[in-house]
Image (cartoon, rainbow, N blue to C red):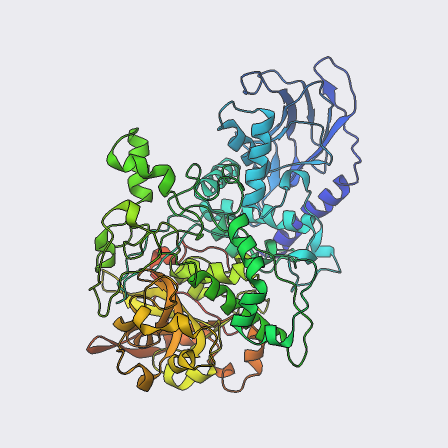
């Protein structure tokens, strides 16, 4: 099959929808009394939709759909329809039968036994777009207590809107974006119209049907499943990483990522005839208003920026950290358990802070690096734990702790044991896949102290002793970049996915998550001085089956130990080695378990990194296991400059590296293996979260592309 028919199908959809948006409709409409009248304009958002019967139904008092239609009609040649205005609300619009053109394959398909629906609780203010997304909102409302009430219909629509990054697909007709001369392949969310976004998400639905060999009904069911898992179209609810200070890996399973996987495929597909070239564009945050007027001193250091932004950070921390859905809102996000999985709600998409004017004393890239490190320090200072959670402010403890004793329904007890698992084995070399938070961070914020692997000063033995707020390694890196307003939700929360976010070979379109560099354990000593604050370093380790995989991610700070001990260093008191692990210290309780001792710290003068490990986010020395297992580096801030950097440009990841073997130390042995055979299959196709393209090219390979740029 050639590409041309696919593009033609898209053009046909866009052109027809553009005409329908003008409001012209010549088809006759008959109500149940045989009267032709005016009322509701609508459109089936499928290419070349023909022969479809459209009916209008009332909603019964019990929230079910009436069996006898109030009115009926047939779509015209553009898929448009017109129905008479009902005398009562809510109502359901239902389309069935007929055929349409699949946007990805170009094939003509029958709607078969499936139906497309939309629920209206009042007269619509725009042409109603019938699609799998409007249908999913009906399914969500039907599943709620009371059925299709006006309030449930609103909640169902809000839930699907949140899934689509705020887009109201039911009220937005896909635009003819392929013919829009103003469209830019480097556009961000603010540059895209809702119509262009709507065109893209309809293409994603088609891609999912092709990927899964399913139909519109199966796609609707998968959207509901994605929402139930806490996922969105651009963010699969998955995370990884292990708290062990020796890197033992036992990450939770990821499951299926549904339409997020198909979105990652479609964004690079020849069938994508929209200006959307990165999923980050769909939810890229807008700048906050009132740009800050910062002094040169405030731009100069993370300490100064943390002081300047303290109130802003406090607001973001306390206002709402979670993306809202029908079950997650501004009042319950801190402890909601209904409608979320055991990782809790996913993060809200934070807006960018307005960039101050760039001057000689306030370079915007330096400001971004310092702002990122200010956000890192802010969250280290919150004394949060290592938890398999997506956001640090969510804790189900108060709501579920009463059921740990076995009192309550079977479901309540089961949920409590799942959400509040702090098994000590998960931090002593055992499997951490079932663990939610470690027993190494206590409720008052202090950490256990460990000066060697697997040995710690104390361990919480009761759920009441555990700090139940926290995030794991990759959720922490994704969170701080989002919290600082730099990437929004563009950075995956799954460690293997985050490590391999890139575009496919030969695609020069841009992404918001930076550039990958082949800086690893074999050359890290040479490149330490080239790293910048905020760079992300990905760490390898063996899993229980003995396979190498991407296990961990850390943040480069640019600081060395002796920098923090200088009398002029503003935060010196937070780096007192004698107070490691205590409340108020930024040092991990395991600081001396990484190949350094208190006696040789000044002599070794290691670089410092920040990661969520052992008992949560803290500063640790870049030594021992970290150094021996560096896999690759991601630069996000000012990534474009890497291409002009004579030293770093040759190390931008290329497809040739797929077959380049490297030798890394592991314990007392060295092992040679192919550079890219690292991500387990569950971190490949199934964990594809839509941030760039993570392609599975074998049992467990991930592709990183030389043409990737920001």
- Which percent across, then down, holds residue 166? 61, 46
Residue 558 position by quadrant: bottom left
Q: Tell which of 107 and 365 is nearer to you.
A: 365
Looking at the image, residue 652 sits to the left or right of residue 61; the answer is: left
Label tally: 0
Residue 595 position by quadrant: bottom left
Q: Tell which of 54 and 259 is nearer to you.
A: 259
Q: Residue furthest top?
A: 33
Residue at (49% x, 82% y) in the render:
648
Q: Tell which of 537 and 28 is nearer to you.
A: 537
Q: Is residue 224 above or below residue 491?
A: above
Residue 155 position by quadrant: top right
- Which percent across, then down, holds residue 678? 34, 66
Residue at (76% x, 28% y) in the render:
27
Q: Is residue 229 above or below residue 591?
A: above
* Quadrant of the snapshot with the N terminus: bottom right
- Which percent across, then down, holds residue 377? 46, 66
Tell me if residue 554 can be seen. Answer: yes
- Which percent across, then down, holds residue 418? 31, 42
Residue at (68% x, 68% y) in the render:
293
Tell me if residue 695 can be seen. Answer: no
* Quadrant of the snapshot with the C terminus: bottom right
Q: Is residue 599 above or below residue 256?
A: below
Looking at the image, residue 189 sits to the left or right of residue 221; the answer is: right
């Amino acid at each position: 099959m050639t590409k041309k028919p696919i593009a033609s199908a898209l053009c046909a959809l866009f052109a027809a929808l553009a005409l329908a948006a003008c409001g012209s409709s010549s088809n006759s409409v008959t109500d149940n009394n045989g009267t032709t009248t005016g009322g509701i304009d609508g459109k089936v958002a499928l290419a070349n939709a023909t022969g479809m019967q459209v009916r209008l139904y009332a909603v019964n008092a019990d929230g079910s759909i009436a069996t006898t239609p109030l009115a009926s009609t047939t779509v015209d040649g553009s898929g448009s329809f017109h129905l008479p205005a009902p005398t009562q609300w809510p109502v359901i619009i239902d389309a069935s039968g007929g055929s349409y053109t699949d946007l990805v394959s170009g094939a003509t398909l029958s709607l078969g036994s499936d139906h497309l629906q939309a629920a209206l609780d009042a007269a619509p203010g725009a042409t109603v777009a019938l699609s799998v997304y409007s249908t999913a909102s009906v399914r969500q409302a039907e599943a709620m207590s009371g059925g299709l009430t006006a309030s449930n219909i609103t909640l169902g629509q809000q839930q699907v809107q949140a899934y689509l990054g705020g887009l109201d697909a039911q009220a937005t007709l896909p635009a003819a974006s392929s013919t829009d001369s103003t469209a830019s392949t480097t556009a961000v969310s603010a540059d895209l119209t809702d119509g262009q976004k709507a065109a893209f998400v309809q293409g994603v639905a088609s891609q999912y049907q092709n990927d899964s060999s399913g139909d519109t009904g199966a796609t609707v069911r998968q959207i509901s499943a994605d929402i139930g898992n806490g996922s969105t179209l651009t963010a699969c609810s998955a995370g990884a990483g292990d708290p062990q200070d020796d890197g033992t890996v036992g990450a939770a399973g990821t499951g299926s990522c549904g339409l997020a996987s198909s979105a990652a495929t479609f964004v690079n597909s020849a069938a994508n005839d929209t200006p959307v070239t990165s999923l980050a564009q769909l939810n890229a945050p807008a700048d906050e208003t009132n740009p800050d007027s910062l002094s040169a001193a405030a731009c100069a250091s993370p300490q100064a920026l943390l002081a300047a932004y303290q109130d802003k950070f406090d607001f973001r921390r306390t206002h709402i950290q979670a993306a809202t859905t029908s079950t997650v809102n501004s009042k319950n996000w801190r402890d909601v358990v209904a409608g979320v999985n055991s990782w809790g709600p996913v993060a809200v998409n934070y807006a960018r802070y307005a960039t101050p004017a760039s001057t000689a004393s306030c370079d915007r890239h330096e400001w971004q690096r310092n702002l990122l490190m200010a956000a890192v320090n802010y969250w280290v200072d919150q004394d949060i734990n290592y938890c398999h959670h997506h956001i640090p402010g969510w804790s189900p403890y108060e709501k579920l702790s009463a059921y740990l004793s076995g009192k309550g329904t079977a479901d309540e007890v089961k949920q409590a044991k799942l959400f509040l698992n702090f098994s000590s084995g998960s931090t002593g070399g055992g499997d951490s896949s079932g663990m939610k938070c470690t027993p190494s961070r206590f409720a008052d914020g202090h950490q256990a102290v460990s000066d060697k692997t697997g040995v710690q000063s104390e361990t919480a033995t009761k759920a009441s002793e555990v700090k139940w707020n926290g995030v794991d390694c990759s959720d922490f890196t994704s969170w701080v970049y989002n919290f600082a307003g730099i990437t929004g939700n563009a950075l995956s929360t799954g460690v293997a996915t985050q490590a391999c976010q890139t575009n496919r070979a030969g695609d020069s379109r841009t992404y918001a998550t930076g550039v990958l560099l082949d800086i690893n354990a074999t050359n890290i000593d040479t490149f330490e001085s080239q790293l910048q604050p905020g760079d992300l370093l990905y760490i390898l380790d063996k899993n229980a089956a003995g396979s190498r995989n991407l296990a961990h991610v850390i943040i480069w700070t640019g600081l060395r130990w002796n920098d923090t001990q200088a009398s002029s260093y503003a935060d010196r008191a937070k780096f007192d080695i004698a107070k490691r692990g205590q409340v108020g210290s930024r040092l991990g309780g395991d600081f001396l378990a990484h190949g350094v001792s208190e006696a040789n710290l000044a002599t070794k003068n290691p670089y410092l990194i920040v990661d969520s490990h052992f008992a949560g986010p803290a500063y640790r020395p870049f030594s021992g296991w970290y150094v021996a297992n560096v896999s690759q580096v991601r630069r996000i801030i000012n990534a474009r400059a890497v291409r002009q950097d004579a030293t770093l440009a040759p190390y931008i990841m290329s497809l040739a590296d797929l077959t380049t073997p490297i030798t890394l130390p592991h314990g007392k042995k060295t092992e040679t293996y192919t550079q890219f055979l690292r991500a387990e299959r569950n971190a490949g196709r199934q964990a594809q979260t839509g941030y760039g393209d993570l392609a599975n090219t074998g049992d467990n390979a991930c592709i990183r592309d030389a043409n990737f740029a920001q």
